[in-house]
Amino acid sequence: MEIIKINGREYTIEEYNRYFYGRVRSVMDKYRVKGNIAVALSGGKDSAVMLHVLSKFDLNLCPFYINIGIPEYSKKCMEYAIKAASHYGYEIEIINLADYGIDINYAKKKCSVCGTVRRYLMNKFAFENECDYVATGHNLSDTVTFALNNMINVNTMNMRGAKPVMEGNKDIKMVARLKPLYWLRDDEIAIYAEINSISYCKDICPYAKHAPTLVIKEWIHELEKRMNGSMINLAKSFSKIEDMMDRTEPRTCDICGYPSYGRICKFCKLRREHEKIQRDSGKNKE
């Protein structure tokens, strides 16, 4: 019998699967998640595992993939995403960033642009398909990393969303966000994928190899090894900080009508910038 050693405990495969499912169930039960769920597939480990676990719940799942347009990498990830959805009997919808006139390969801050367009397009897809939630594969490691990165950069506005579920607002076309893997670390998810033979793309985004968040994530994993339970306590602390914060509620963008903290949302600003880049590029060719 194979024994899994993690978190200072030993599990059989059956016991570990029960533990893992229980961590996801704690999120689903506490927030009473039900209805139509837009499932954001990236082709990577976390979203593949998320789909596997969500398929065990009585939910209507709507998988989709956002093709960011990174040569070779996006194509490979898309193939894994399509394969994952098909495995569970779902048709997947492909959203191409290029259809919106944005080419991430021209962006100066590629990771920032990637985050902006993904958040916008995920919400847009979920709203247009009348979904109650949009589910992402963000896990405990991601949550703590993003929160610490925001604090390091004095970016308190983005502290919103530190909880497993962020409420939506239909009046401004904002769909609730769900993180089923919120209480699970990177290594725990990797083990689950391995013992359940879940395939996923193991390539690293060529633009994210030197991202500062990777340094932060390495640090918090090292901290967790020395002080077991640190990551869960940090996540709980960030959640409480979010509760205490005074924040400006979003309005709607004057151009697209989706949520924005200003008159024009970041996505529409990006479209304008890239339209200008393309116009200038055309002039140079002439």
Image (cartoon, helix red, strand yellow):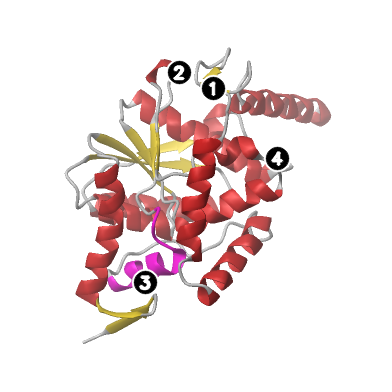
Q: Position of residue 5 (x, y in %)?
A: 35, 81
Instruction: State the extent of the magenta-drawn residues as a range.
Output: 182-195
> Which residue extends farthest bottom?
1
Question: Which numbered disc, 4 or 3, marks the residue that appears first in the sequence?
Answer: 4
Q: Residue at x 29, y 69 (%)?
A: 197
Reading the image, the residue beneath label 2 is 172
- Residue at position x 36%, y 56% in the image: 48
> For this view, does 84 lie left or right of residue 46?
left
Residue marked by disc 4 = 107
Q: Say which residue appears at 49% left-offset and 62% top-offset.
A: 231
In magenta segment, residue 283: no
Mark sitting earlier along the chain (3/2): 2
Magenta-drawn stretch contains 189: yes
The amino acid type found where label 2 is placed reads Ile
Label 3 sits on residue: 191
The image shows residue 246, relative to residue 139, as above or below, that is above
In this rendering, the answer to whether 213 lies above or below 14 is above
